[in-house]
Image (tube, helix red, strand yellow):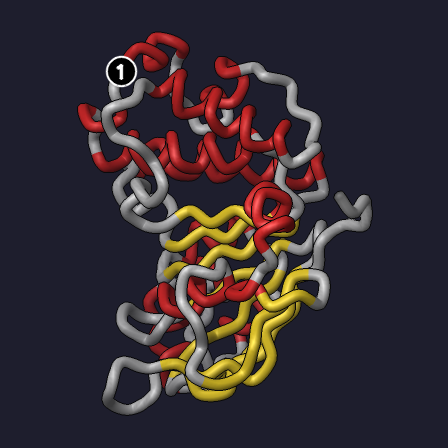
Amino acid sequence: MSSTPAVLEATDVWAGYGGPPVLAGVSLTLRPGDALGVLGRSGVGKSTLVEILGGGMRASQGHVTLDGVPVGKTPRRRRKEVKARLRTVHQNGLAGIDTQRTVEETILDAFKEARKAGRTTNNDVEAALAVVGLPIRFVTRRVGTLSGGERQRVAIARALATRPDLLLLDEPLTAVDQSMREEIADDIRALVRADGIGLLVASHDVRLLDRLTDRVLVLADGTFVESGPLRDVLRDPQHPDTQAVAASLPELTGGRPPA
């Protein structure tokens, strides 16, 4: 396995579902240590972008590579390595998880996958769950019996347990109680920083992006229309979608409405 930290690169990515393109020439780079947000209203293509970046869907044009190798065409001999280095957590929190297995088995499976790919893990289930605010008593619960928010948290714990180079999160805490969301986000960010994990968070939740990311890309009209530190973008929004977000969150713009 390569010891060089993974670099994910999307170049001129287009995608759609038969009508107008959902993504129309999107490019980005994600490196270990980055904390990047993709901000956009519902339906603009955030989930499609995450799916393509993670290799679950192919772009109709353009390409996505991990260390120069196409993510959607990874050679069989490298698939375990790529899966361990690049993890994706979808909004429903269930993709790739056997709902009949217990929470403990689910986390241990992640440790096993990482070891098979040559990565070192601490094999500490309790610590993995603590990052997402779940007590040790959850280890005996079957995934299929969990609430939506609990499933999202287990999915994130499972992804972080392997200490990936890069982590892609698609609306990761939408089903989690608002009272817990900020604390969990802070714990995730602390672990990501400590381990130097590259993080991409696609969300319409501006407060979540404010806690998890250093920089955002605003997705609208199929492409990125603005970029920069979130609060800077909201203080001087240029696109109507960004202006609407800024107007609804004056506390993030210094209490002043956007110009």
Answer yes or no: is residue 82 visible: yes
Circle 1 SS class:
loop
Answer yes or no: is residue 166 visible: no
Q: Is residue 7 left or right of residue 130?
A: right
Q: Is residue 50 above or below residue 17?
A: above
Which kind of residue does numbered mark 1 sit on?
Arg
Q: Is residue 135 left or right of residue 121?
A: left
Q: Is residue 142 left or right of residue 120?
A: left
Q: Is residue 229 left or right of residue 16?
A: right
Q: How many marks?
A: 1
Residue at image coords 57%, 49%: 79
| 241 or 86, nearer to the observer | 86
| 167 or 43, nearer to the observer | 167
The residue at which mark 1 appears reads as 141
| 192 or 99, nearer to the observer | 99
Residue positioned most to the right? 3
Image-quadrant location for residue 114 = top right
Image-quadrant location for residue 41 = bottom left
Residue at image coords 72%, 42%: 196
The spot of residue 115 in percent (x, y) is 63, 27
Residue at image coords 50%, 81%: 13
The spot of residue 18 in percent (x, y) is 24, 86
Q: Is residue 179 above or below residue 42?
A: above
